[in-house]
Each structure stands twice: as structure tokens, then as C-alpha cells.
Image (cartoon, helix red, strand yellow):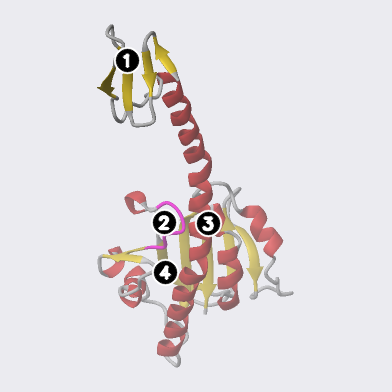
Amino acid sequence: MRIDTGYFFQGDGMVHRLGSDKRWLAYAQPKGLQRGFSLIEISIVTTIIMLIAILGIPAIQSYVIESKVPRVAEELQRFVARMKATTQGFGVAPYAGIDTGVLANALRTSSVVLVSGVGPGARVLHGLGASSSGKGGVHLEPYAMPGGQSGTAFALTLRDVNQAACPGLAAILQRIAEYVTIAGTSGPVVVKNAMSEPVMSYSPLLADAQCAAGDSNVFTFVVR
């Protein structure tokens, strides 16, 4: 292949030139000769990567949260079963002194939720949404059943839950709860009430309709 007047590439990796005395003179061909990317090409690739990140990261986060719902629900179901077993036969208000510290002690060794602190000021983070600055917490407190006193039941409240966890979270935990509310698109809306007459069965469609986009959903499960 001709590359310049009097210069030719040969298959031996050398550049040859016909000299004035009609003899071929060999010159070493530069190795690793490459053409760099232009600024426009780099800009295009960078833009494409940014678009993929913007569109893909939320979808990945939603998938991670959705896949974590059954494990968080299982931990809370185990706690509820433990509370029922240990308080059975202890009067009409066995949960009068219950608080988030009790939940924290029960779940301290869990690999699913994040627990910190002790006593009433303890924090239990569910990881199903916002977790910065103490958000994304699970709170435990006494609850008064209709006609009864505080402590006849207890309420588990999960705040700052992502939409990806809804209504899966409610669908699982409603099995152990007498009363379930969801606050998202509006104030707390009852999606199950086993204490009413007639009994209001759990409604998955109503639950799904209450969930708002983002990490602003609040779930409350009342257990006796």
C-alpha cells in the first residue's frame, strides 16, 4: 500500500523506501499506532451512560425493595408470634408496657432489619424505603381495642415505605392483624377491620390504591 512518495509498507513490519542509488532502505514502522477518540465521541458515550444510569437505577432499587418484603414480613411475623406466646394469660392488657425497645431486643440479631439503641428510644429500620436521618423505622406501641383499655392489643407501624413494597407488605402482614391502615395518597385508610360489624375483609385493591409514589407510605398493623 502506498503511503507517501517513495515509501511502501511491506509484510515484514518495516517501511521501505527506494534510495537514490536504487537500493531499498528499511525503516522501523512505529508500533502501537492508534487514533484517539474525539471530544464529540467521548461526550456521546458519556451521555448514553448517564441516561442508562438515570433510567436503570430506580428500577433496580424497586426490585431490591420488592424482593426484601417477604423477609421483613417474616421477621415481624416471628416477633408477633413470640409476643402472643409470652403474654398469654397475663390479664386483659398484656401489652400495656410495650414499646419499640421490645421490638429492638427481639430483632437485634436480625440480618434483615437494622437495629440501634435500647429502650423506648431504640430504632428499628426496615430498609423498605428511606433510611436516612432515622427514617424508614418500625414503631411499636400499645393499642386499645374497642371497649377496652390501652394494652389490650399493640400496633406495629412502618413509616417511609417505598411504593415498591405495596401492597405486598400489607398482603402478608394482614394475616396476623385485626386492623390495617395505609396512609399514602391521603390520610390513613382502613383496608381491613376484623373488629367491625360486619367484618371488613382485607382488600388488596383498596390497599394498592392508597400507595403513593416514593417513600411516603405508612402502614399500621394492629395485633391482639
Q: Quadrant of the N terminus?
A: top left
Q: Are marks 3 and 2 in contact (CB under 8 Å)?
A: no
Residue 136: numbered disc: 2
Q: Which comes sooner in the sequence, label 3 or label 2?
A: 3
The amino acid at mark 2 is: Gly
Q: Which comes sooner in the sequence, label 3 or label 1?
A: 1
**Magenta includes 129?**
yes
Q: Which comes sooner in the sequence, label 1 or label 2?
A: 1
Q: CA distance from mark 2 to mark 4?
A: 17 Å
Q: CA distance from mark 4 to mark 1?
A: 92 Å
Which circle, 3 or 2, is nearer the viewer?
3
Give percent across and percent down for residue 86: 40, 89
Q: Are marks 3 and 4 in contact (CB under 8 Å)?
A: no
Q: Residue at x 32, y 15 (%)?
A: 17
Which circle, 4 or 1, is nearer the viewer?
1
Task: Give the residue number, with chain letter if any, for mark 3.
Answer: 63
Task: Give the residue number, with chain letter if any, for mark 4.
Answer: 141
Which circle, 3 or 4, is nearer the viewer?
3
Instruction: Point out the stretch of residues depicted in magenta.
Output: 125-130
Which circle, 1 or 2, is nearer the viewer?
1
The amino acid at mark 1 is: Arg
Q: How many marks?
A: 4
Q: Residue at x 70, y 72 (%)?
A: 201
Q: Residue at x 51, y 63 (%)?
A: 67
Residue 52 horizontal side relative to residue 97, left or right: right
Give percent across and percent down for residue 208: 65, 57
Task: Give the residue number, with chain letter if any, for mark 1.
Answer: 17
